[in-house]
Amino acid sequence: MACRITKPKDPAAAARAEVVELLFVYVDRLKQHFDDLAETHGLTSVQAKVIMSLDDPEPMRSVAECLGCDPSNITGVIDRLQERGLVTRVEDAHDRRVKRITATAAGRKLREAFETDLFRNVPGMKTLTNAQIADLRDALASLARPEPKLSERPEPRASARAAG
């Protein structure tokens, strides 16, 4: 059961609160879908994210940044994937301190199967038309654009502050 968000009295703010609540619920569904498929393919969610991120040889630091963690946190994940023959780890040709991770043929085959399963039946999208999916993509792309942090936004003008 999802947690409910208290609705503000202002109708516009209440509508935004409802959108946020629905997005939270949907993201939880997508995460569960991803986790279930990872398990079906014999992977943890983190291992699946690593496999999904390896198109070209990537430095471990880049893989960690993609996952939003410190490189030391993915060493064990890479070790287990390497033990299974799904990735290789080699020294960078220009900097021996850098380890590059590459999906093996078995890793690429697993990634393709995982991607096929992941996007075949995305929760809630089966009944949407291609036009609705395109509209949803456009709306989400607009929402996903970075905005300046509150601390980086310009100060309101004095006249605007006085009016408030």
Image (cartoon, rainbow, N blue to C red):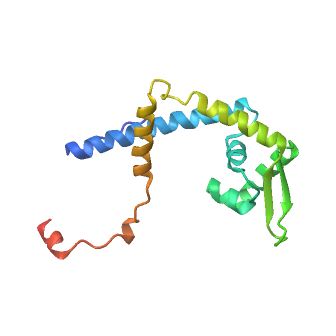
Number of marks in picture: 0
> Residue 104: where, in percent of width, then height?
83, 46
Image position of 110 with respect to 100: above or below = above
Image position of 67 with respect to 105: above or below = below
> In the image shown, does 15 or 53 lie closer to the viewer?
53
> Residue 23: where, in percent of width, then height?
42, 40
Residue 67 shows up from this direction: yes
Residue at the extreme left of the image, as rendered:
163
Residue at the extreme front of the image, as rendered:
131
Residue at the extreme top of the image, as rendered:
127
Image position of 131 with respect to 163: above or below = above
- Left or right: 147 with respect to 157? right
* Image point (37%, 36%), residue name: 4
Res. 24 image quadrant: top left
> Residue 38: where, in percent of width, then height?
69, 35
* Image point (46%, 31%), residue name: 130
Image position of 117 with respect to 61: above or below = above
* Image point (74%, 54%), residue name: 56
Res. 66 image quadrant: bottom right
> Residue 29: where, in percent of width, then height?
52, 33
Residue 36 shows up from this direction: no
* Image point (83%, 42%), residue name: 105
> In the image shown, does 13 or 115 lie closer to the viewer?
115
- Left or right: 20 with respect to 52? left
Quadrant (top left, top right, bottom left, bottom right) of the C terminus: bottom left
